[in-house]
């Protein structure tokens, strides 16, 4: 079974790599991986991913297979998360579903830091859950090391995960103040220290922490057809593009949420309407089941405390997804960035999927009737169709 999955993944991945046209950023990442000096030079993009490509060069590992290896690591971590956090579901279903999601292959065909950010953030999730169970120095040390690697690979992760982790460190229950301070010092030193050095080098070389003046509103004024990029980074634009990106990548069997697709009108088909209804009804079922659970078990605070003790991975996945979406919309609104599209939201997709699987596991545990689960099975089958259609279409086009 595992061998068959690996063969299918390799085939899908090869199809997308063969047909992909490298983006300017991908070409820049490949160029930066030529030497240690080029990988570490102050730049708009952090050095983590170019350094990984440099290591691949040194050991003569094909660069085009680096993202495939990272994807396999991602599936291993997802299996562990499913095994530890979704006891009422076979642990194979979550990684199996994620392995056929077409947006993986579309994004992994490019040399961008999102490919390394996903497995590293999953490690952060696992170690943060371990820290919530046992607040030892070894767990905070492992968590800090994973965050350090993640932050020097993608600057956005610093704004995304630091507030969540610091909040858990400060509000940790049953810990002495001295322990909290010691663990906070460990996190600040190890997780934030290396990326702080990189940001300082950027500032010294360019005058900007991230290597460019992202707060320069005048830089958004672009001529001609590319003026779309300047006109589509307001708060309302970012909210709408976020929703459209999620819709196209999850619900639509016909398009990926590329820049071009996001700037164009998308005629919604009857099939996509059906998929949207299934998703809304499934989320409604989770909400109704949670409401009934709250009614039986008392206050919301007590339920959340119990939930963190019983299923920290599920609760953290929801935090990671909502935190990522919120930070992305705020950052893209305030600073000078491209309009939101699939690459920018890609690292959050796995946490949406874990959250939905966790919701299904919760409904399955609370409901005695199998009829209540048919809705999720219908949604699951619809999403399988959407993604298999996309990847097979790409496989056909590459031949």
Image (tube, rainbow, N blue to C red):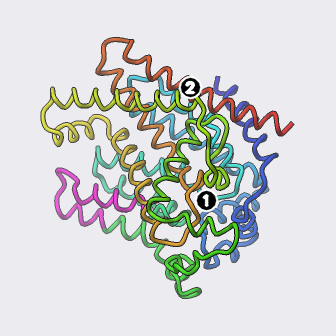
Q: Give left or right: position of 45 versus 68.
A: left
Taking depth in this image into account, of 21 and 112 the one nearest to the observer is: 21
* Image quadrant in which the C terminus is located: top right
Q: Residue at x 50, y 82 (%)?
A: 200
- Residue 163 on the magenta span: yes
Disc 2 crowd rating (10 Å Cα; few below 14, some 14-19, many 20+) is: many
Q: Which residues are magenta?
A: 160-184
Whether residue 198 is visible here, answered yes or no, is: no
Q: Label 1, secondary structure: give it.
A: loop
Q: Residue at x 50, y 21 (%)?
A: 378
Disc 1 crowd rating (10 Å Cα; few below 14, some 14-19, many 20+) is: many
Q: Quadrant of residue 324?
A: bottom left
Taking depth in this image into account, of 388 and 259 the one nearest to the observer is: 259
Q: In the image, which disc is placed on residue 382?
A: 2
Q: Give left or right: position of 139 versus 36.
A: left
Which SS type dominates the magenta stretch?
A: helix
Counting from the top left corner in percent of width and height, residue 52 is at 65, 60
Q: Which residue is mark 1?
A: 113
Q: From mark 1 to mark 2, how far is it between C-alphas?
A: 30 Å
Q: How many marks?
A: 2
Q: Residues at badges 1 and 2 in contact (C-beta under 8 Å)?
A: no
Q: Does residue 196 lie above or below 178 as drawn?
A: below
Q: Does residue 82 lie above or below 199 as drawn?
A: above
Counting from the top left corner in percent of width and height, residue 318 is at 37, 44
The outermost residue toward the right is 399
Q: Earlier in the sequence, mark 1 or mark 2?
A: 1
Q: Residue at x 83, y 39 (%)?
A: 398
């Amino acid at each position: 079974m595992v061998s068959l999955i690996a063969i299918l993944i390799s085939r899908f991945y090869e199809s997308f790599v063969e047909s992909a046209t490298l983006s300017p950023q991908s070409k820049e990442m490949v160029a930066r991986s030529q030497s240690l000096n080029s990988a570490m030079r102050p730049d708009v993009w952090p050095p983590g991913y170019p350094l990984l490509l440099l290591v691949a060069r040194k050991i003569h590992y094909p660069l085009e297979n680096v993202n495939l290896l990272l994807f396999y690591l991602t599936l291993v971590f997802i299996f562990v998360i499913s095994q530890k956090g979704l006891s009422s579901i076979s642990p194979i279903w979550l990684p199996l579903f994620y392995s056929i999601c077409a947006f993986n292959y579309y994004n992994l065909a490019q040399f961008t830091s999102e490919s390394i950010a996903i497995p590293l953030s999953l490690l952060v999730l696992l170690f943060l859950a371990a820290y919530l169970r046992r607040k030892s120095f070894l767990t905070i040390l492992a968590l800090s090391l994973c965050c350090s690697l993640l932050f020097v690979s993608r600057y956005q992760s610093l704004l995304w995960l630091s507030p969540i982790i610091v909040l858990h460190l400060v509000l940790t229950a049953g810990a002495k103040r001295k322990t909290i301070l010691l663990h906070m010092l460990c996190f600040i030193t190890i997780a934030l220290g290396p990326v702080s050095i990189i940001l300082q080098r950027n500032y010294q070389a360019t005058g900007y922490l991230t290597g460019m003046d992202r707060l320069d509103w005048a830089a958004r004024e672009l001529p001609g057809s590319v003026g779309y990029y300047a006109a589509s980074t307001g708060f309302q634009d970012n909210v709408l593009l976020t929703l459209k990106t999620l819709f196209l990548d999850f619900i639509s069997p016909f398009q990926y949420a590329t820049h071009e697709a996001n700037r164009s009108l998308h005629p919604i088909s009857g099939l996509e309407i059906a998929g949207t209804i299934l998703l809304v009804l499934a989320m409604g079922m989770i909400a109704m089941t949670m409401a009934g659970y709250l009614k039986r078990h008392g206050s919301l605070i007590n339920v959340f405390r119990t939930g963190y003790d019983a299923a920290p991975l599920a609760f953290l996945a929801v935090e990671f997804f909502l935190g990522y979406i919120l930070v992305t919309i705020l950052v893209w609104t305030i600073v000078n960035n491209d309009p939101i599209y699939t690459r920018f939201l890609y690292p959050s997709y796995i946490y949406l999927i874990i959250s939905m699987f966790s919701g299904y596991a919760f409904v399955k545990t609370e409901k005695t009737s199998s009829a209540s689960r048919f809705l999720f099975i219908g949604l699951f089958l619809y999403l399988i169709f959407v993604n298999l259609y996309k990847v097979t279409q790409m496989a056909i086009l590459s031949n």
